[in-house]
Image (cartoon, rainbow, N blue to C red):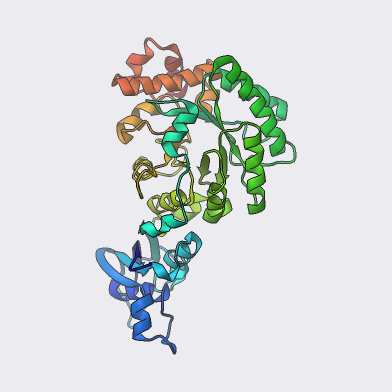
Amino acid sequence: MGNARVLATYLIETPYSLEHAAAVMAGEQSTGTFVSVPGETEALKQTYGAKVLSIQELESVERPTLPGAKLPKDGHSVYRRGEVVLSFPYHNFGPSIPNLLATVAGNLYELEEFSGLRLIDLELPIEFTEKYLGPKFGIERTRQLTNVYGRPLIGTIVKPSIGLSLEELRILVRELALSGIDFIKDDELNANPPYAPLKERVKVVMEEIERVADKTGKKVMYAFNITGDIDELRENHDTVVAAGGNCVMVGINSVGYAGVSYLRNYSEVPIHGHRNQWGAMTRCPLLGMDFKVYQKLCRLAGVDHLHTNGLNSKFYESNESVIQSVKSCLTPMFGNDTIMPVLSSGQWAGTAMESYQAMNTVDLIHLAGGGIVAHPGGVSAGVKSMKQGWEAALAGTSLTDYANTHQELALAIEKFGRKK
C-alpha cells in the first residue's frame, strides 16, 4: 500500500488551544487513547499514527455551539474555532468505506474537548478504486438511456407520496409518460408497502411505460425505490430489471455506503441516490459533515444520480449551498466519475432560469412535483412549461418574454408566482 494517505479537513470549536485539540483528534483516531499504554512505541506511532498537517485559526466565540464540552482546569475565556487537516495512513484501514468512516468520522464527535466538530473535506488516494469502482452509468450513460442531450432531464415524483392504488398509479404513470417527461421516481416514502407491493407496482408501471414507448418511441426512465434490508436489494433490483425497468433508487443513509456498494457490484441499471436523513447529518454548521464529503463517499460507493435540493426550495438549505453541492457532483475525483445532480423541492419552470445562471450546466435531473402535476393546464402542460423554462434559460431570453409566445410557461408563471 506504500505511503498512501487520507487527508481529512475539519472545522472545530474548542475551549482548548487549537494545537492541543488537533493532537487529541490525531491520537484518538489512530494509535493513542486517554493515557499512554504498553506497546505504544515511537516506532508504532510513526508508522500508524495520524499526523496534524495544518491548523488555521479562525474566529473565537463566547458560547459553545454544542453541549458537553469539558473546560480546561485553568479555566477559559473563549471557544476557539479553526480548520485542522489530519493525515491518516491508508494502511490503517485499507479500501473500506465503513472502516474509513470509523477513522475520519468516528469517536471524534464525542470527544469532550470539542464544542463543535465537522468534517468538511476528504482527499482519498487512488488505491480506493481497487475495490470501489464508482458510478457505473453516471451522466453519459444516463443520457444514452433516456436519449436526452443538450438540456437537463425533466422529471417528477409520484404524488401523493403514499396511498395510491395500483390502478391509480397506472393512470398517473400513463399520463406522465404520454406527456413527454424524461424521468419519474417513486417517493422515498414508498418502497414495498403491503397495499402496493414492489413486484406488483413494477409490473403496473412498466406495462404503461412500455405501452407508451411503443406508441411514441420514448421510454421514460423510472426510478423504483428498492430500499430495504441488504438481503432484499438484489431481489428487488432483479425484479425491476426483469420487467424492463431502467433505474433503481435507494435511500443511501438507510442502506449505508456498504449497501450501495453491494448494489453497484451487480446493478444493470443506474442507481438513483436519495439522501433522506441527510439533514440530521449536516444541519448544524459545527457538527456532522459537508455535502462535499458526503457526495465523494456516495460516488465512490457507486451512485449515478444524487439529490442536492434545488434553488428556493421548501427546505432550510441556502441557495449557495445547493450551488456548491451541484458543483461538487460535477467535479471529477478519479477521472470520468462525475454523477448527475438532482434538483428537487419547490421546483417549477421558473427555477430553470436561476438554476442555469447560477450553476452553468445542463447536466442535471430537474424534478418538479407540484410544479408539474399541479400546473393549471394539467400534467402535459406542466412538463412543457419546464422544458420551456430551460429553453428560455439556454436562449438567454427572459422568462416573461418567452412566456409571451409559450402559453404553458405563462400559466406556470401565473400559478406559481415567481416571475423573473
Of residues 316 and 403, the one drawn nearer to the viewer in this rendering: 403
Q: Is residue 152 above or below residue 409?
A: below
**Hey, which quadrant is residue 269 in on the image?**
top right
Coordinates of residue 381 in the picture (x, y in percent): 50, 16
Q: Relative to 28, is 356 on the left or the right?
A: left
Q: How many marks?
A: 0
Q: Is residue 217 above or below residue 329?
A: above
Q: Residue furthest bottom?
A: 38
- The residue depicted at 36 percent of the width and 40 percent of the height is 319
- The residue depicted at 41 percent of the width and 51 percent of the height is 296
**Hey, which quadrant is residue 119 in on the image?**
bottom left
- The residue depicted at 48 percent of the width and 66 percent of the height is 102
Coordinates of residue 2 in the picture (x, y in percent): 35, 68
Coordinates of residue 6 in the picture (x, y in percent): 36, 63
Q: Is residue 401 above or below residue 304?
A: above
Coordinates of residue 167 in the picture (x, y in percent): 72, 25
Of residues 386 and 345, the one drawn nearer to the viewer in this rendering: 386
Q: Residue furthest top?
A: 405
Check the picture and name the quadrant holding the N terminus. bottom left
Q: Is residue 169 visible?
A: no
Q: Is residue 39 visible?
A: yes
Check the picture and name the quadrant holding the C terminus. top left
